[in-house]
Each structure stands twice: as C-alpha cells, then as structure tokens.
Amino acid sequence: MEKQFIYISATILLILGLVDFGRSYILRNNTDYTSGKIISIWQPNPKSVKKGNSKWAKFKYSVNGKIYVSKNKIQVPMNMQIGDRMKIKYSKKDHEKIYSFSLKRAIMLCIVSAMLFIVGKFDLL
C-alpha cells in the first residue's frame, strides 16, 4: 500500500510538472513579466485555519505605462499581504489576464516526482 501511494504521488506530481512545462512552452511568446501590487486577497478558509488553506490575490500593475487590474486571481504565498509587490506573468493579448504557472515550479515538481519514483523503485523507505 505504501509503494502504491508513493507511485500515485509521483505520477500526480509529474503530471502537474508537465502541465506547467506545457503551458510555459505554449504561451512563451504570448506572456511577459511585470511587477504587480496586491490589491485584494481571498482565502477559501478562515485566516485562523493554517493547514490546507491558500491565498489568492488580485493585482494592479503597469504595462507600457498603462495601469491594469487583473480580472483573475492567482495563488500567492501565505505571508503576502495587500500592498506587497510580486513579479507576475501577464498575457500580451489580454493585459488584464495573469498566470500562475512557472518554469521553476515545473522543474521542482518533476525533480520531486523523480525522487519519489526512485524511492518506490528501490524500496528506500
């Protein structure tokens, strides 16, 4: 049962990593980066709930001298607050759309997945 859990986890992480790689590749010419300021935050659970909670933010940012407000939210680290600045990825075709996928995260997901496959294969637990 333990081995199955390891393989299932490794497969899920690999799929998530490949999805991020795919999105980065497909949208590589249609996205760019800018610095954005958090203007609103939403959490699915009360702030007092730490485990299993997440934070989603809307941003205000400038592209070519024009100010935009994101029409969607992206997940941000739990320590971020309204007014904090963060590097964000936006669509060149629709400047109000921002993305949360990242190449760094894709690489990390694939590395962790590979490690779990190795752990499962060689019974390292």
Image (cartoon, rainbow, N blue to C red):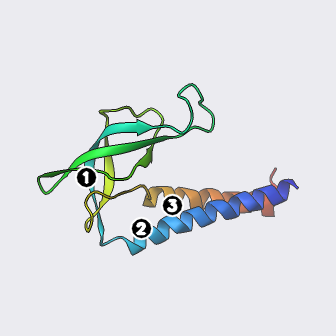
SS class, disc 2:
helix
Disc 1 designates what residue?
34
In the picture, measured across the screen, residue 112 lies left or right of residue 89, that is right
Q: Report the residue at 71% width, 57% height from top.
A: 9
Dot label at residue 59: none
Callout 3–callout 2 Cβ contact below 8 Å:
yes
Q: How crowded is mark 1: few (under 14 residues within 10 Å), some or many (20 or more)?
A: few
In the picture, measured across the screen, residue 65 lies left or right of residue 118, that is left
The answer to which of marks 3 and 2 sits earlier in the sequence is 2
SS class, disc 3:
helix
Alpha carbon separation for disc pair 2 and 1: 16 Å
Q: Report the residue at 13% width, 57% height from top.
A: 64
Disc 3 designates what residue?
106
Q: Residues within 10 Å of mark 2 (few under 14, many from 20)?
A: some
Q: Quadrant of residue 13?
A: bottom right
Callout 2–callout 1 Cβ contact below 8 Å:
no
The x and y percentages for residue 33 are 28, 57
Q: Can you tell which of label 1 and label 3 is closer to the viewer? A: 1
In the picture, measured across the screen, residue 7 lies left or right of residue 66, that is right
Viewer-proximal residue among 116 and 72:
72
Quadrant (top left, top right, bottom left, bottom right) of the N terminus: bottom right
Kindly identify the amino acid type of the residue bearing the numbered disc 3: Ala
Q: Report the residue at 80% width, 53% height from top.
A: 124
Callout 1–callout 3 Cβ contact below 8 Å:
no
Specify the farthest residue to the right.
1
Dot label at residue 24: 2
Specify the farthest residue to the top.
48
Alpha carbon separation for disc pair 3 and 2: 9 Å
The answer to which of marks 1 and 3 sits earlier in the sequence is 1
Q: Report the residue at 63% width, 34% height from top.
A: 51
The answer to which of marks 2 and 1 sits earlier in the sequence is 2
